[in-house]
C-alpha cells in the first residue's frame, strides 16, 4: 500500500507541476522583455529598475535543512527590504553587513542582486528558471508515480505469486531510476545554462533505455530467472513445471 500512496502523491504533484510550466515560461518571457524604468517606480511596475542597497544583515543559514538564505537590505533613505534567496552561492555566501549591492526590482520585488564584483544571484522572487524546474519535477514525479501505480497494483491482482511480485518490484524501482535521471537532467541543464529543451533531450533517451531494461527484467522475473535453483527450460522452450510426460 505504501507504493500506491507514493503513486497518488507523485502523480498529483506531477500533474499540478505540469500545469505551472506554461505560466512560468510566460512570466520569464515577460521579465526578459521588460524595459528599463525611466525613473524610480513609485509603485509595483512591469519595468525593471536597478536600485543601490546596503546590506544590513545576512543569514546564509548554512547547514540548516529546509532554510532559505535571508538578507536584510536598506535603501539610502533607511527603508529596509527583506529578501530571501533559495541558496547561498554565489553572492549571499560572501555578503557582510555594510556591503554595497545593486538590486534589480521588478513588479515591486527584488528579483536579482549584483555585488561589487559583478556576480549575480537570483532571489526567490526571480522568474528565471522556474519553467525548467517544473519540467524536471514533472518528469521525475510522473515517472515515479506511473511506475509505482503499476508496480503497486500488479501484486494485488496476482496475490501469492512470487514471480509477479518480483516483476512488480522491477517496475517500481525502474520508475525511481527514471525519476532520478530527470533530476540529473535538470541539474545538468541548470549547471550549464542550457535551454529548456535540453532536459527532455537528455532524459528521453536514458528513460527509453531504462524502460527497455524494465521490460526485459520484468519478463525475466515472470519466467522465474531470479528464483534460486530455477529449473532450466525444456528444449522446446516450455516451462518444465507445465510439461507433461509423453504417453
Image (cartoon, rainbow, N blue to C red):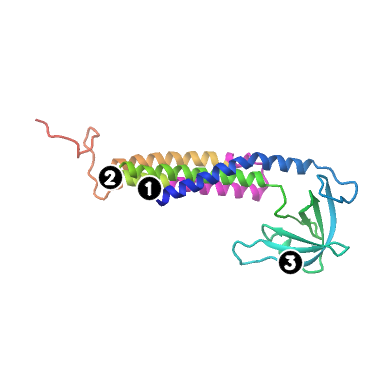
- Image location (x, y in percent) of residue 47: 83, 45
- Image location (x, y in percent) of residue 161: 28, 45
Q: Is residue 90 visible?
A: no
Q: Which residue is mark 1?
A: 169
Quadrant hosting residue 71? bottom right
| Front residue of this view, candidates 154 and 218 | 154
Q: Is residue 61 above or below residue 207?
A: below
Kindly identify the residue that appears in the image at 47 percent across and 40 percent down: 209
Quick one: SS at disc 2? loop
Q: Which residue is mark 2?
A: 161
Q: Residues within 10 Å of mark 1 (few under 14, many from 20)?
A: many
Quick one: SS at disc 3? strand
Give the extent of the magenta segment. Answer: 173-201
Give me the C-alpha separation between circle 3 and circle 2.
Answer: 59 Å
Q: Main secondary structure of the magenta part?
A: helix
Quadrant hosting residue 124? bottom right
Kindly identify the residue that appears in the image at 50 percent across and 43 percent down: 143
- Image location (x, y in percent) of residue 64: 61, 66
Q: In the drawing, does residue 235 fall left or right of residue 64? A: left
Which residue extends farthest top?
Answer: 247
In primary-sequence order, the first of circles 3 and 1 is 3
Q: In the drawing, does residue 41 fall left or right of residue 151? A: right
Q: Are marks 1 and 2 in contact (CB under 8 Å)?
A: no
| Front residue of this view, candidates 159 and 97 | 159
- Image location (x, y in percent) of residue 17: 59, 44
Kindly identify the residue that appears in the image at 74 percent across and 40 percent down: 29
Residue 58 shows which numbered tag? 3
Which part of the image, by quadrant, shows the C terminus? top left
Q: In the drawing, does residue 109 fall left or right of residue 42? A: left
The answer to whether residue 178 is magenta is yes
Amino acid at each position: 500500500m505504501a507504493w500506491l500512496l507514493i503513486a497518488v502523491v507523485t502523480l498529483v504533484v506531477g500533474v499540478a507541476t505540469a500545469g505551472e510550466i506554461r505560466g512560468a515560461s510566460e512570466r520569464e518571457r515577460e521579465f526578459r522583455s521588460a524595459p528599463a524604468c525611466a525613473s524610480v517606480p513609485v509603485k509595483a511596475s512591469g519595468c525593471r529598475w536597478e536600485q543601490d542597497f546596503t546590506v544590513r544583515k545576512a543569514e546564509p543559514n548554512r547547514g540548516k535543512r529546509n532554510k532559505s538564505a535571508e538578507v536584510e537590505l536598506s535603501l539610502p533613505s533607511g527603508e529596509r527590504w527583506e529578501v530571501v534567496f533559495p541558496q547561498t552561492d554565489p553572492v549571499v555566501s560572501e555578503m557582510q553587513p555594510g556591503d554595497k549591492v545593486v538590486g534589480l526590482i521588478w513588479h515591486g520585488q527584488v528579483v536579482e542582486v549584483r555585488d561589487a564584483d559583478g556576480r549575480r544571484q537570483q532571489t526567490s522572487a526571480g522568474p528565471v528558471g522556474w519553467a525548467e524546474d517544473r519540467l524536471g519535477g514533472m518528469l521525475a514525479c510522473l515517472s515515479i508515480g506511473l511506475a509505482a501505480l503499476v508496480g503497486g497494483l500488479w501484486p494485488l491482482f496476482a496475490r501469492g505469486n512470487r514471480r509477479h511480485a518480483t516483476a512488480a518490484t522491477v517496475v517500481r524501482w525502474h520508475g525511481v531510476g527514471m525519476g532520478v535521471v530527470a533530476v540529473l537532467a535538470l541539474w545538468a541543464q541548470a549547471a550549464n545554462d542550457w535551454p529548456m529543451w535540453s532536459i527532455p533531450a537528455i532524459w528521453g533517451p536514458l528513460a527509453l533505455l531504462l524502460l527497455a531494461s524494465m521490460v526485459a527484467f520484468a519478463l525475466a522475473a515472470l519466467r522465474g530467472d531470479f528464483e534460486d535453483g530455477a529449473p532450466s527450460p525444456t528444449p522446446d522452450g516450455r516451462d518444465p513445471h507445465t510439461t507433461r510426460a509423453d504417453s
